[in-house]
Amino acid sequence: MAMNAPRGTQDILPGTVEDWQYIENTLKDLSHRFNYKEIRTPIFEHTELFQRGVGDSTDIVQKEMYTFEDRGGRSITLRPEGTASVVRSFVQNKLHGLANQPTKLFYIGPMFRYERPQQGRTRQFVQFGIEALGSEDPAVDAEVLSFAMKAYQELGLSSLKLIVNSLGDQESREAHREALVNHFSPHKEELCSDCQIRLKENPLRVLDCKKDRDHPAMKTAPSILDFLNEYSRTYFEKVKFYLDAMDIDYEVDPNLVRGLDYYNHTAFEIMSEAEGFGAITTLSGGGRYNGLVEDIGGPATPGIGFALSIERLLMALEAEGVELPKQEELDCYIVAIGEKPELEAVKLVDKLRSEGLRVDKDYLHKKMKAQFKAADRLKAKKVLILGDREVENNLVNVKDMATGEQKEVSLENVMAELKKMKEE
């Protein structure tokens, strides 16, 4: 029986992986400019971390986690998102004690969710995210939103829409929670089974339901913005003030709640408005999560972050017809005919690679014509030709594949000649 990759996973092959590398390098460069440092956390964690950090009432915890028992009887889960792991590391390694605060971190790596695979949604997906821990300044919220928008814009996307909302502080949320319960309770039996549970455990998440989104009660549900206390309202106004100062366009959507339990105050999503992108337009999202550090056992520490899926980013690039630059060309390809030239080619390839050049050669003992075809397919800028005569005279023929110009140079001077031709 043929062995295939598990459902919901994919192989990223040469020719495609270069796009991934370019995206990852761009995001890392942007992180350095914003002074975010990389953090790498385990791919699996104790299940309790996500139950406490992400929230027991979320679809992720209830339906989508890959959870198993290890040989020691411990419940282990493949990470479904990055924030909980970063916060756990922040607490465990006492990063809150560092002199420079806030602690600004970025991560990139695979996440795992058991959901129905579809375009842009896989069971193993790669997520990039940033977290800023230790400041409750609205300017940090604006910085994170700016980072998120720049991440897409610097990769060439333009059909973007930033949606923002405030979920308020604990007092505001409690008042809104009570209003939601009163509003939806008369319609409880008309809601899906998940929402009937959410109405009791976390009524805010009823607004995020995909099954009941067309229910009439959704359209008349009380808005969180009507229940913000003075502090929460002022905080949100400052965030918007900073966004305006940076000329970042946005829309306020009072129904934006996000799917994780730990959010409060600022919440946001970035949508693709590209034609043909698909029914699910969300590219990324994030928000503030004051209280999460305490939930995971750390000191009171405010935080904010966002995450994006590389897979959905690639979909958006395709929808907008953006082609990423790829470094596919070889600096040179060595064609060798004969036993002695083959030995000299092996030595020359190794020497040129040590000098920092991208070099390859034939390993299938093809004839000269076939080797030149291989060099052409690999987009080699130069071809170095070695035959018995060249070896005997300590020479190599250097051919410029763009102009067809060819010249003989000594093996000792080949590196200098290649550099000279490259500069020309």
Image (spheres, rainbow, N blue to C red):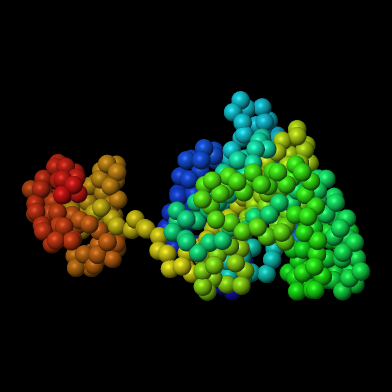
Extreme residue in the top direction: 99
- Side of 410 relative to 133 (left or right): left
The answer to whether residue 171 is visible is yes
Residue at image position (89%, 71%) is 187
The quadrant holding residue 416 is top left
The quadrant holding residue 156 is bottom left
Q: 322 above or below 242? A: below
Q: 345 above or below 136? A: below
- Side of 146 relative to 289 (left or right): left
Residue at image position (80%, 52%) is 227
Q: Position of residue 6 (x, y in %)?
A: 62, 66
Residue at image position (75%, 54%) is 225
Q: 139 above or below 9? A: above
Q: How many marks?
A: 0
The answer to whether residue 64 is visible is no
Q: Position of residue 190 (x, y in %)?
A: 87, 74
Quadrant in which the N terminus is drawn: bottom right
Q: Position of residue 341 (x, y in %)?
A: 18, 53
Q: Nearer the viewer, residue 168 or 6?
A: 168
Q: Position of residue 407 (x, y in %)?
A: 9, 54
Q: 115 above or below 296? A: below
The quadrant holding residue 420 is top left
